[in-house]
Structures are given as structure tokens and as C-alpha cells.
Image (cartoon, coloured by chain):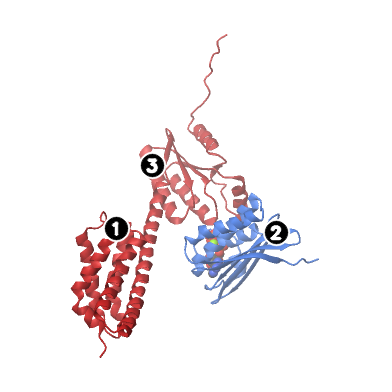
Amino acid sequence: MITATISLNKDTLNVLREQDVVVFRNRVKEYAVKIKMGLVNQTKLITAASELVRNMLRYANGGQIIIEVVSRGRDNGIRLTFKDEGPGIPDIKLALTDGYSTGKSLGLGLPGTKRLVNEFDIKSEVGKGTRITIIKWANG
Amino acid sequence: MAIEITKLFKKKQAVILERWMTNQLADERLREDLMSNEDLRAESEELITALVASLNESNIENPESGDFDHVIEILAGISISRARQGYSPRETGVFILSLKEALIEIAQEEVKDPKELNIANRKLNRLLDSFSIITFETFIKGREEVILRQTDEIAEISTPVIRVWDGILALPIIGTLDSARTQVVMESLLTEIVESGSSVAILDISGVPTVDSLVAQHLLKTVSATRLMGAECIISGIRPEIAQTIVHLGIDLSDIVTKASLASALQYAFRTLKIEVRKSAVKSAV
Ligand SMILES: Nc1ncnc2c1ncn2[C@@H]1O[C@H](COP(=O)(O)OP(=O)(O)OP(=O)(O)O)[C@@H](O)[C@H]1O
Ligand SMILES: [Mg+2]
């Protein structure tokens, strides 16, 4: 049976500068604490969020993030949507490979994020931008 | 014929300056500790001269006009320097608002026709309000610069390298480890290794809230640099939730000696340096 995911509480943030990263991470933490997410899951979610916001700043000069409390059946979770109007990712499969980086970095951000969360969805169009949605369930 | 208020201001420039000065000096919160009356007069004179010179009957209704570029430049300069010197927004606001008051006073005395006076007042209000907004905007920008500078200073002072033992350094990192911070951490650590001739450095990250791939990369770089100096680097203070997250993220720290706490890192360092620390056997009196 498929249970619908319902959005309960929503917040939109524009991220344009390095300084916004800490503010955003703290906001995610507030949300996670509010739904009584355990410390390990909280840390995983915040780390995933940190990866995606950094990518957005680094490769797309910033963008917009939606933070939501979602519920599915008895479980609550946090959904984060990252939207940017950057260059887009030409080969998503490649970008999701451990160690692949166009920025001389570790290349772990995207694949690592995918492992840290329960749901991971990425849509990207070259020249248009990228949209990544993740969900971490409180007890997931 | 209608009075040309801008011509009137040109003629009365000296009077306006005097009024304005009186208004400013009347404010009991005037910061004589920050600026002498002479400096205040010089600033005021510069601004009023520029304003009167650029003002005419058509642009008085158009605060956006490019004719005011010079005025705005002066105003912004004054505002920024006041922000840096620690003036309050109020003190900065009084500067421009008391000019408005002086101009309106002069208009009131010189323009006899109530209808004309009304029109003149409205124009003056609009123009000077627009200047006030610019004053506040630049003031805030000035304050933001101050904050950014302080952030840099905090980054510098919050990375103390501690000589915990002969040959052992500890560096507690508190807060986010961004690129700029890493640079500071690395520099002070490497310098201290040389100066103290230490061979073990402990990086304690219990105060780092999030270890993402960027932070990990910075840590790895610091460890490699330490090794190049011939010292060993231990990372301590890895909380259980951080350990689990690092593993999922895929960061490989297997090359590095990591410890859960500073105490166990210290123990490890003692062993490496063949230092023995033990409780002295106190003979109890029978
Ligand atoms: N929002 C984005 N817009 C455009 N390209 C992106 C975006 N996010 C990621 N990419 C591309 O995908 C690649 C992989 O991203 P990933 O986060 O996995 O690694 P990285 O950022 O290069 O390194 P790390 O995150 O480990 O420091 C990036 O190098 C970049 O080319
Ligand atoms: Mg990345």
C-alpha cells in the first residue's frame, strides 16, 4: 500500500552566501528537534543538507531551499528541496559516483548524501538548473 | 511669480549651515568624544555645499536624479565612517534629519504664500527622506563590515594551540571549519610544531557541529601538512553520531589515528613518545 506524504509545516530560505550555510543548518536542526528525530538521524540529515547547500553555492551561485515537516502514516520526517538555476548536471549517474568531482574535491557530496537519507530525488537540466529533494524520516 | 526655493537656498547657504550646526549641537547626545565640533562643521559644510550646488528647481522633485551623485557619495562616506567609529544609528540619523529641519525652517521664514510653502515642504521632505534612507543603508553596510572583520578576528583567536606536554600539542577546534578557518588553524599549528619541536599534534573536533565532506577534506589536508613537518597528527573528539555519518558519507579516515576523546588521544601520544604516566604508590600508614 502506498501512503501519501503530507506536508505539515513549511519554510523557504534563500541561500546566496557562505554565511547562510550555518543559519540554514541551524534551521534544519530546529525542525529535526521539533519532530523528535534522534541524534544520529539528525546528524545525518544536517550533514546531507550541508553537502547540498555547499554544492548549490559552489556550482550554482546559490539558490532556494524549502524545509518541510512531512508525515507518512505514523512517521514524521523532514523534506528538503534545493532549487538552483545554475549550469545543471550533464551526467547525473556520473555525478552520483563516489570520487567524481569537477571541483577538485573529494566527490562524496552527492553519493554520500544519497546514503545518508531515506529518499533522494534529483532532476537537472543543463543550462536550466538543478532540483534535489531529500527526505529523512525521524525513525528511518 | 513663484519663489524659486533652490535659488533661495543658494543665497542662504551660510545661514543654513549655521542653523544646521545649531540643530546638531543642540542634540544632547552629540558624540563630542568621537568627533570635534570643527570636524563636524567641516563635514556639514562639505555636504551642504555639494547639495546647494547640485540642487535646482527640476531635480528637487527627483531624488533619483544623477545630479545628486556627488551629494550621495559624500553622505555615504560620512555614514560608513560613522558606522566604523561606533556611532549609533540615532546619532547618524540626527545628522541628516537636522539638515532637513534647517531647510524647512528657512523655507518657512522666506516663503510667505502658504500654498507655495506647502509645496516646498513636500518637495524637501521627499528629497531629504530619500537621503535619510541612503544614510541608513550605508550605515548598516558599514556595521556589517565591522561584523565581518570581527568574525575574522574571532576565527583567529578561537584556534589556540596548546602545549599539553613536552612534545605534544593540542588544538581544540570549535565551530565550523571553513576554508578560511582551516588556513588559520593550519598555519598556527605548523608554526607551533616548529617552535616547540613537537612530534605529536592532537586535533580535537568535539566542538565542530557538522563534519561534512568539506570539513573532512580540510581535516585531511591539515593532517597531511602536519606529517610533512615530521609530526604525527591524531584526530580526537569524534562523537558516535559523527562517526556513523562519516562512514555513510564515504570519507576514509583509516589512514589517520582517530580517538573518541582527548584523553585517549593523549594516552596514545604518551605511548608513542614512550612517556609513562602512573599513579604514585602511596604507602599507607598502618
Ligand atoms: N547544484 C549543482 N549544480 C551543478 N553541478 C553540480 C551541482 N551539485 C553538484 N554538481 C556537480 O556534481 C559533482 C559531484 O558533486 P559532489 O557533491 O558529489 O562532489 P563535489 O562537490 O565535487 O565534492 P565534495 O562534495 O566531496 O566536496 C560536482 O563536482 C559538480 O560538478
Ligand atoms: Mg559537493
> Ligand 2 is found in which quarter of the picture?
bottom right
Mark closer to the observer (2, 1) = 1
Q: Which chain is blue?
A: A
Q: Give residue B192's mark.
A: 3
In the image, what residue occupies the spot 72% across and 66% down? Answer: A5
Q: Position of residue A131 (x, y in %)?
A: 59, 70
Q: Amino acid at mark 1?
A: Glu
Task: Looking at this view, name the residue that lies furthest to the top.
Answer: B286
Tell me where residue B14 sits by quadrant. Answer: bottom left
Q: Nearer the viewer, residue B67 or A27?
A: B67
User: Residue B7 placed where, x, y %?
Assistant: 22, 82
Marked residue chain, label 1: B
Spot the red chain and give its letter: B
Q: Secondary structure at mark 2?
A: strand
For the residues labelled 3 and 1, the Cα–Cα distance comes to 52 Å
Q: Chain of mark 3?
A: B
Q: Secondary structure at mark 3?
A: helix
- Looking at the picture, how far across and down is residue A73, in whole percent? 76, 61
Calculate the distance from the C-alpha at mark 2 to the C-alpha at mark 3.
49 Å
The subunit carrying tag 2 is: A
Q: Is residue B208 visible?
A: yes
The residue at which mark 2 appears reads as A76
- B117 or B141, nearer to the observer: B117
Which of B224 and B41 lies nearest the eye of the viewer? B41
Give the labeled residue for mark 1: B28
Q: Residues within 10 Å of mark 3 (few under 14, many from 20)?
A: some
Q: Above or below — where is B229 with respect to B95? A: above
Q: Amino acid at mark 2?
A: Asn
